[in-house]
Image (cartoon, helix red, strand yellow):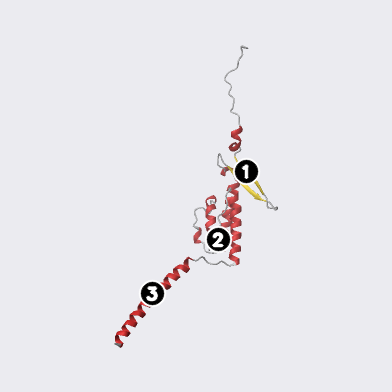
Amino acid sequence: MVKKEKEEAKVMADSLAKENQLLKARIAAVEAKIPAILSDAELNELGEAQAKADSVAHAFGAKAPAPMMGEKPLSYRRRVVEMFKKHSKDWMGIDLSAIVDASTFGIAERSIYADAMAAANSPASYDIGHLHEHVQRVRGGGEISTFKGNPKTWMGQFKMPGNKLTGINTKGD
């Protein structure tokens, strides 16, 4: 009888050990999905990165996306700079995810933002039929909107149709 009880205890211990391992694996999977808590320094860095990206995005009449929950500063900077990479001839075809050092990435980021600002301010970048709004924030908290683009975009609706000379009456009739 003692032998049977020992076997039952061993089977019970084995099933509890397996159940314990499954429970630990489920807890680890749930913990992996919980966003990381960022330090104050990381939150400040995210704010600075968003402000830089927002100033460039405003030049195109857009707004920079907000950081995602738990997103690290370098990941956010990489994600946002991809939006403006198409305006940089030097960095257009380069895979920026290969740059792991934040200071080295900063060189690429500054260059891409400078190229994007130059493209936003270039008349060649204005689409025909569209005006680009540039919002400038002033110290008092207000905003000043200026528009760049082809004036015919909005003035065309007020324009009178052109007159065409079909002939000159020389007979005096």
Secondary structure of the residue carrying numbered label 2:
helix
Distance in Å between CA atoms under marks 3 and 2: 46 Å
Is 32 on the left or on the right of 135, as rendered? left
* Mark 2 in CB contact with mark 1 (< 8 angstroms): no
Q: Nearer the viewer, residue 82 or 41?
A: 41
Residue 24 numbered tag:
none
For marks 1 and 3 on the same chain, the one whose residue lies earlier in the sequence:
3
Three-letter amino acid code at disc 3?
Glu
For marks 3 and 2 on the same chain, the one whose residue lies earlier in the sequence:
3
At a point 59% along the width and 52% down the height, the residue shown is 56
Structural crowding at the residue carrying mark 3, measured as other residues with C-alpha within 10 Å and reported as few (<14), some (14–19) or many (≥20): few
At a point 29% along the width and 85% down the height, the residue shown is 4
Three-letter amino acid code at disc 1?
Phe
Quarter of the image where the C terminus is located: top right
For marks 2 and 1 on the same chain, the one whose residue lies earlier in the sequence:
2
Residue 40 in picture, x, y percent from top left: 60, 66
Residue 110 in picture, x, y percent from top left: 59, 56
* Mark 3 in CB contact with mark 2 (< 8 angstroms): no
Q: Quadrant of residue 133?
A: top right
The furthest residue to the bottom = 2
What residue is shown with label 2?
A: 105
